[in-house]
């Protein structure tokens, strides 16, 4: 058997992953929409905690 005298060096990436900036999601939300949605959910939670027993009859 012939011996393989090649020296293998570590990859130059150093374990880092490249992410491309060109990628854009098809779904995008503005910060104002997220804040509005959270406020609506909080109001619904308050209403259900206050009057939910009468609405649901549980």
Image (cartoon, rainbow, N blue to C red):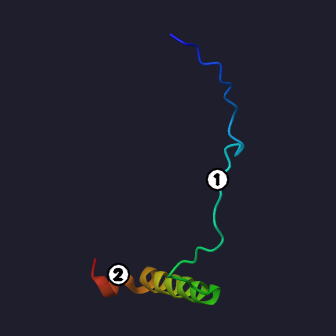
Q: Which residue is mark 1?
A: 17
Q: Is residue 7 above or below residue 25?
A: above
Query: Would you call the spot at circle 1 few (<14 residues within 10 Å), some (14-19), or many (20 or more)?
Result: few
Q: Looking at the image, do the residues carrying marks 2 and 1 touch, with CB atoms under 8 Å apart?
A: no
Residue at the top extreme? 1
Give the mark, 2 or 1, whose residue is nearer the N terminus: 1
- At 63% across and 62% down in the image, what residue appears? 19
- At 41% across and 86% down in the image, what residue appears? 51
Q: Is residue 18 above or below residue 30?
A: above
Q: Which residue is mark 2?
A: 53
Task: Say left or right for 13 vs 55.
Answer: right
Report the disc number at residue 4. Answer: none
x, y (%) of residue 36? 57, 89
Q: Nearer the viewer, residue 4 or 30?
A: 4
Q: Nearer the viewer, mark 2 or mark 1?
A: 1
Q: Secondary structure at mark 1?
A: loop
Residue at the left extreme? 57
- At 66% across and 71% down in the image, what residue appears? 21
Q: Nearer the viewer, residue 8 or 1?
A: 1
Identify the image quadrant of the C terminus. Answer: bottom left
Task: Say left or right for 46 vs 7.
Answer: left
x, y (%) of residue 22? 63, 74
């Amino acid at each position: 058997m012939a011996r393989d005298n090649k020296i293998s060096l570590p990859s130059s990436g150093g374990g880092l992953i490249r992410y491309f900036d060109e990628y854009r999601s098809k779904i995008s939300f503005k910060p104002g929409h997220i804040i509005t949605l959270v406020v609506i959910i909080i109001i619904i939670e308050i209403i259900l905690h206050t009057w939910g027993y009468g609405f649901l009859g549980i």
